[in-house]
Image (tube, rainbow, N blue to C red):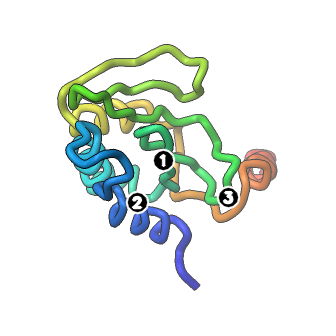
Amino acid sequence: MTNPVEAAWHKILTTAGSPCLPEGSLLLEPFAELVRVAHAEPLLRQLYPWTGMWELHFSRCTVIRPTWDIPYIGTRRDGRYYVEGPSRSSSRIAETGSASAAVAMVVDRLPPHCGPAFIGSADELAAYEKARDRR
């Protein structure tokens, strides 16, 4: 059986630079660079990655409805990155011209005892953590 975290990273790594926008789009290379840098970080590589709107998100569980407790990184048309979250209603944490700096900001804000990703849903993860904490 394939590890869902590894499979998700593989899919994102192999498609991050694929043109789904017009050729020459300013978002392609910065986003591909972000994915490569995030994957190189062991603490993020153990989390479940997902993408949308030129953003890279991380979840502590492998089944979508993600946990939404980890900041995410977006790519701007000018090649810069922004870090927001952990939820959509949170304010922007920072902007930077460096994928490495953006990844470091996320790592600095990981919840305690984060990872590896729980094989299952966010609800199952919450139940597991609740039972674990009662022990």
Q: How many marks?
A: 3
Q: Quadrant of residue 45?
A: bottom left
- The answer to whether mark 1 and mark 2 are in CB contact below 8 A is yes
Q: Who comes first in sequence, dot 1 or dot 2?
A: 2
Viewer-side residue, 56 vs 105: 56
What amino acid is labelled 1 in the image? Thr
Residue 89 versus residue 47 in the image, above or below: above
Which quadrant is the N terminus positioned in?
A: bottom right
Q: Which residue is mark 3?
A: 63
Q: Who comes first in sequence, dot 3 or dot 2?
A: 2
Q: Position of residue 11 (x, y in %)?
A: 43, 66
Q: Position of residue 60 (x, y in %)?
A: 58, 50
Viewer-side residue, 104 vs 56: 56
How far, Cα to Cα, is label 1 from label 3? 14 Å
Q: Position of residue 62 (x, y in %)?
A: 62, 59
What amino acid is labelled 3 in the image? Val
How far, Cα to Cα, is label 1 from label 2? 8 Å
Q: Which residue is mark 2?
A: 12
* x 40%, y 50%: residue: 44
Viewer-side residue, 43 vs 55: 55
Q: Position of residue 94 (x, y in %)?
A: 33, 18
Q: Quadrant of residue 46?
A: bottom left
What amino acid is labelled 2 in the image? Ile
Q: Give the left or right position of residue 20, taking residue 68 as reference.
A: left
Q: Give the left or right position of residue 106, taking residue 123 as reference.
A: left
Q: Residues within 10 Å of mark 1 (few under 14, many from 20)?
A: some
Q: Which residue is mark 1?
A: 51
Q: Who comes first in sequence, dot 1 or dot 3?
A: 1
How far, Cα to Cα, is label 3 from label 2? 16 Å
Circle 3: element type: loop
